[in-house]
Amino acid sequence: MEKIRMGVVGLGHRGRHMFKLAAEAFPDQVIPAAACDIISSNWTETKWLQTRPMGEIFPEAKFYTDFSAMLAEAELDAVIIETGADIHAQFCADALKAGVNVLSDIPVVATVEEAEMLWKVHKESKAMFSTGANANKTRYSRMMRELCKAGLLGKPYYMESEYVTGQHWEDKAYSKGLTENGDWRKLLCPIRYCTHSLGPFLAFMDEDLRKVSCFGTGPQAPIEEYHGFPKDDVQTAQFQTDSGVVIKLLRTGRCRAKIGSHNYRIFGTEGYFESQSERGKQGQIIRYNSTKYYPASELVEQEGGYMPYECIHNPAATGHGGADYVILEEFINALLTGGESPISLREGLRMTLPGIYAEMSAKQGGKLLEIKYPWDNE
């Protein structure tokens, strides 16, 4: 194909952002053809920091409230799935069945059964599936991956990740209830949103995570603040591979920690790596050392950040410091050149399913569970 007729389903803040970024950053490759949402005002009214309605920004694009109709009529080459994360799977499956290439945000599925279904549908489809795991494209993620693949850290045998959101209980965003589109982050337990944390590690690991035990704190704020969905404020899971590599993940969606969101640590046989988010006046910092690289024989410290190095001087590279731009660029290039999926469905499920099993473990008091994947019996 010479140009990609692009569609989007889910016109919340992120869906609007990704559709605009695809059309405006890649005008020679993308035709913004169609958009779908059950709330028509998301297309006709000005919302979420935009200066004009989406319908005015893209007057040639057709708007739908029925996803099946959009797939049948809009002659799409690709669709961006930006619905709530609890309902990604069926939209992805419907697009793949229609032969439409998919860029799905994360988490990819909400249940083990959905994973089996989507895996089967994808195997029977000729369309591409790519996972929108923008955390895998950040500067710190790329750096840890390059250090590990070059062998400078030796064998990583223990890793830690933190994803801290909901900086304080009194935040209005956590006391106004569900938004008009439904806030899926309030519906999911914290550990289920693990893809930003596990994805960067799994990108350089050959093994799948196989065991998990998870504990939660229970709700610690006044119960009325949970709007009918009380859950653990903090959950901590420990995962293990078949060879014994351990990953600890801390996830919280409600706390008083006024710090940045993402933190990572890697302990290797020949070195150490950490990426620490901002703390007050301290910006994000990367630290590492290596016995195999003399300039880093002592701990090296440098500025961290989301933005990939190649995006620093590119004004079009926006969204999570440019990581969203990279996700779209790689997806578009793969479609135009007939290349492989930048982040395959398998990679998306590898970083999604462990969180689903972790939730099961937490509900069973931390019981050790085996993580199963759709490809295990193939």
Image (spheres, rainbow, N blue to C red):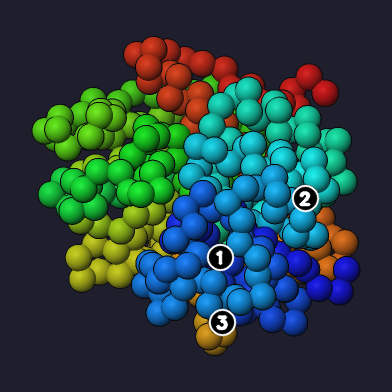
Sooner in the amino-acid sequence: mark 1 or mark 3: 1
| Residue beneath disc 3 | 316
The disc label shown at residue 72, or none: 2
Give the x, y percent position of residue 224. 14, 33
Camera sees residue 196: yes
Sooner in the amino-acid sequence: mark 2 or mark 3: 2
SS assignment at label 2? helix
| Quarter placement of the C terminus | top right
Give the x, y percent position of residue 137. 58, 62
The residue closer to the viewer here, 166 or 365, is 166
SS assignment at label 1? helix
Picture residue at 78% right of the left edge, 19% below the top: 377
| Quarter placement of the N terminus | bottom right
Picture residue at 41% right of the left edge, 29% below the top: 237
Kind of residue indicated by mark 1: Met
Judged by depth in the image, the label closer to the viewer, 2 or 3, is 2
Kind of residue indicated by mark 2: Ala
374 left or right, relative to 153: right
